[in-house]
Image (tube, grey):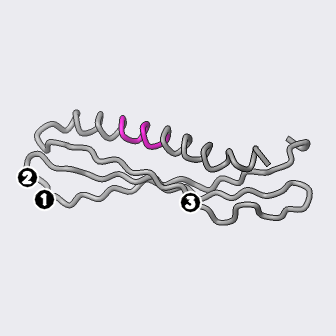
Amino acid sequence: DDQAALRLNLGRASISETDPGLPGAGSRDIDLTLTAPFSVQRQATDAYLLDQQTLDVSERISVNDNELLAQDDARRAARKSLHEAAARQLLERLRPLAEQ
């Protein structure tokens, strides 16, 4: 919107997995972390109000190596949850700018 006072720049989000367990060990936990860079600029001057910020949200899921379909479902649900949590976090971080 050309009339907007601020511009939100969103970078590419990435999701990483950390699996401290051993494959084939039966039940184990996997940590998923979504990271997304963003910045906010004043439209009129291109001045940064928030420069080089990062959203970070994490979730731990339990998986069983004997249930591959359930693993896929758990990962899919966790990814959806991470995106929703990141959106909430972004709105919370932007709220003070809207109140100025």
* In this rendering, position of residue 99 left or right of residue 11: right
Label tally: 3
Range of magenta residues:
77-83
Disc 2 is placed on an element classified as loop
Q: Is residue 8 above or below residue 87?
A: below
Disc 1 is placed on an element classified as loop
Q: Amino acid at mark 3?
A: Thr
Q: Residues within 10 Å of mark 1 (few under 14, many from 20)?
A: few
In the rendered image, residue 79, in percent from the top left (x then y), is placed at: 41, 41
The residue singled out by tag 2 in the image is 25
Q: Which mark is residue 22?
A: 1
The residue singled out by tag 3 in the image is 54
- Residue visible at 90% across and 62% down in the picture: 45
Q: Is residue 82 above or below residue 53?
A: above
In the rendered image, residue 22, in percent from the top left (x then y), is placed at: 13, 59
Of residues 39 and 19, the one nearer the viewer is 39
* In this rendering, position of residue 100 left or right of residue 89: right
Quarter of the figure with the N terminus: top right
**Mainly helix, strand or loop, the magenta region?**
helix
How far apart marks 3 and 1 lie (CA) works out to 31 Å
Q: Is residue 22 magenta?
A: no
CB within 8 Å, label 1 to label 2: yes
Disc 3 is placed on an element classified as strand
Instruction: Name the mark nearer the viewer: 3 or 1.
Output: 3
Of labels 2 and 3, earlier in sequence is 2
